[in-house]
Image (spheres, helix red, strand yellow):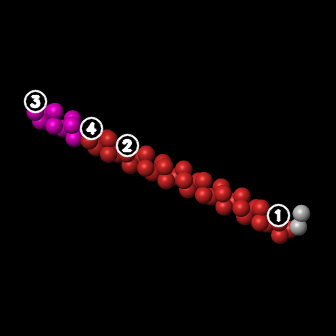
Amino acid sequence: MTSKTVTVIAVLFVTAAALSSCGNTIRGVGADAANTVDATQAAGRNVDRAASR
């Protein structure tokens, strides 16, 4: 293998790893946002129940 071929393979590998990491991060942020909304809604229900008593 020539050094150019090795360099191209290395760049492709690093690019693939970086893109897969970004995908996982975006999914994680989406899950965190959904959990935040759920927690906020639950807190609102708790306040509503406490105020109704």
Checking the image for residue 35, the label placed there is 2
Pointer 1: residues within 10 angstroms few (<14), some, or many (20+)? few
Label 3 Cα neighbours within 10 Å, binned few <14 / some 14-19 / many ≥20: few
Amino acid bearing label 4: Ala
Give the CA distance from mark 3 to mark 4.
17 Å
Q: Looking at the figure, which quarter contains the C terminus?
A: top left
Q: What element does badge 4 sit on?
A: helix
Name the residue carrying label 1: 6
Query: Sequence order check: which comes first, mark 3 or mark 1?
Result: 1
Q: Which residue is mark 3?
A: 53
- 28 horizontally vs 42: left or right: right
Residue type, label 2: Asn
Answer with mark 4 or mark 2, whichever residue precedes in sequence: 2
| Location of residue 18 in the rendering, given as x and y in whole percent from the top left corner | 62, 58
For mark 4, does the 10 Å Cα neighbourhood hold few (<14), some (14 to 19), or many (20 or more) residues? few
Magenta range? 42-53
Position of residue 29 measured from the top left corner of the image (x, y, whole percent): 45, 51
